[in-house]
Amino acid sequence: MTPALSFENLNVWFGDGRDRVDAVKGATFDVAPGDSFGLVGESGSGKSTIMRALTGLAPHWSGRMAVNGQPLGPKRDREFFKTVQMVFQDPYASLHPRHSVDQVLSETLYLHGMKDIDARIVRLLDDVGLGSRFRFRYPHQLSGGQRQRVAIARALASDPAILLLDEPTSALDVSVQAEILNLLTDLRAEHNLTFLMVSHDLAVVSHMCSQLAVMQNGEIVEVMTVDAMRRMTSDHPYTRALLEASLGYRRAAE
Amino acid sequence: MTTETSEGLRAWLLTETPHSRWQARMGSFYQGWLTLRGNPMAMFGIAILVLLLLLAAFAPLIAPHDPFAQDLSNRLKPLGTAGHMLGTDSLGRDILSRLIHGSRITLYIVALVALIAPIAGLLVGTVSGYLGGWVDLVLMRVTDIFLAFPRLVLALAFVAALGAGIENAVLAISLTAWPPYARIARAETLTIRNSDYISAVRLQGAGPLRIITKHIWPLCISSLIVRVTLDMAGIILAAAGLGFLGLGAQPPSPEWGAMISEGRRFILDHWWVATMPGLAIFTVSLAFNLLGDGLRDVLDPKDGSQ
């Protein structure tokens, strides 16, 4: 079976010459269609950069990236954006402050060449549990969770097969986090989505994903299943440290 | 109008759940208006500017005399002379009538400069900021060259090439006034262009043209509007200065700067001839400044929420 996403020896860097920073070094992993894959690691370990390289937001990369077996070139075409969409980390930064929900969604639908835009907006808002009451509100009239729902609706507008989630709940209140995670789980089942999810919260990853890759300093140190993670049977010392740290945190919190 | 319908309109405008794009847009305008109305200084500025607009629109009806009618037997009359409330100038023309007719010229200058300079600046600044690279380099060096050009020298060149007149003076002012707007627009664009909402719309396949015009402009325009209203005073003064030097409005046009220039000869003995147009310039400049301050509170997207 062709993987939905495949990365082979991916290197991503920023800057040139002396200022060059290698954000991702030799990352290799596959995401099977319909699967949910987690990327974990501490801040600055290159998790989000992999996503940005995939979507063309980080221009300097080498290696091989493929979506449904189609290798990606330096430019992303319309077809790519129809297949792969992304939900950003901070819903307070990912919505245009001057555009109403209606404007955001109708522009997105228009850009994807959709026809019945009005009906689709209503359906999208229903899908993410907002309802058309929210259709003409501006971002400043929405709460963080509501904003993130709008961002998810925007990502779903083109009926993508693959959704990239860049820490979709880390900017939200704990109570809202669960709502958004459940919404994402439901949507994944409904729309048959493939998830690639970045998080530094192991609990979130174990709730959402079946497989995960652990990153440290731009390198993938280990790819493992969530079951293996739960059993704490990992080969790499960094993974073990990460797992123990998360346990320690929980014990301290309780 | 009954109070009931106006209450209904208010509720319609302030609703949290608007039912159409039109209602949502009107609602946000109304919110802005409420903020502006809460600022007495800004309302004072608006009142002066509305008065100026009305004066300009109905100048021939309001002005007690023909602004060009000379009466040499009646020259340099002081304030409060019967029939000439603000006195007469060196050719016996009624100063009040000239000021009222001059408001048309002032508005004309303001409108023309406000159309040319910020729009040119916005275009150059956003394109330069968003595209970056060598486009940015070239456009910003051009901006530097225009910034370095002395305004009056350019005006002189214009007048020499195209003839003296208020239009050419305004054109010269606009040509030297756009670089600061370009700088502001570029700085705003640089902070906006890497934000998540621009990345998000790029991920929908939007091209640079759409991103610049539909996503970056709306965020730059507010700070430019504020800057224009604050600069208005300077623009009126620059036009008056050109008129004063004889490069702008030509006599007998009742342009306020030119009027001051004429009155300068008598400033010690007949102070009102230069002072009255000076007061007019001062009032209008002040009004624009107050309005600009108020607009900044309304339009700044960073604290645009209620």
Image (spheres, rainbow, N blue to C red):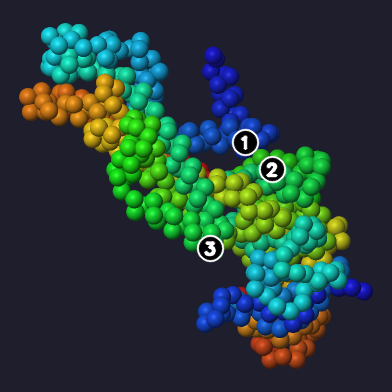
Mark 1 and mark 3 on one chain:
yes
- B133 is higher (above) or lower (below) than B225: below
User: Cα distance, mark 3 to mark 2?
Assistant: 36 Å
Q: How many marks overall?
A: 3
Tell me the amino acid under the disc marked 2: Asp
Whether tag 1 and tag 2 are in contact, CB under 8 A, the answer is yes
User: In this view of the protein, which residue sits in the foreground, A247 or B250?
Assistant: B250
Q: Nearer the viewer, residue B142 or B288?
A: B142
For label 1, count other residues whose C-alpha is less than 10 Å away and answer few (under 14), some (14-19) or many (20+): many
Residue farthest to the right, as pictured: A1
Q: Can you give x and y, in whole percent of width and height, for residue B134 in the image?
A: 53, 63
Residue at the limit of the structure toward the front, as seen here: B161
Which dot marks residue B134? 3
Which one is in front, B288 or B161? Answer: B161
Three-letter residue code for mark 1: Ala
Identified at 82% across, 54% down, the residue is A159
Provide the chain ID for the residue under circle 1. B
Q: Say which of B13 and B26 sits in front.
A: B26
Residue designated by label 2: A102
Secondary structure of the residue carrying tag 3 is helix
Amino acid type of the residue tagged 3 in the rendering: Trp
Q: Is residue B12 left or right of residue B104?
A: right
Instruction: State the residue at coordinates (33%, 42%).
Output: B157
Q: Determine which residue is flagged by label 1.
A: B24
Disc 1 to disc 3, how far (Cα)?
A: 41 Å
Q: CA distance from mark 1 to mark 2?
A: 10 Å
User: In percent of the image, x 81 and y 71: which residue is there?
Assistant: A71
Q: Is residue A75 above or below residue A61?
A: above
Percent coordinates x, y for residue B77 in the rendering: 13, 15
Rendering coords of residue A55 (x, y %): 71, 65
Chain hosting mark 2: A
- The tag earlier along the polypeptide, 1 or 3, is 1
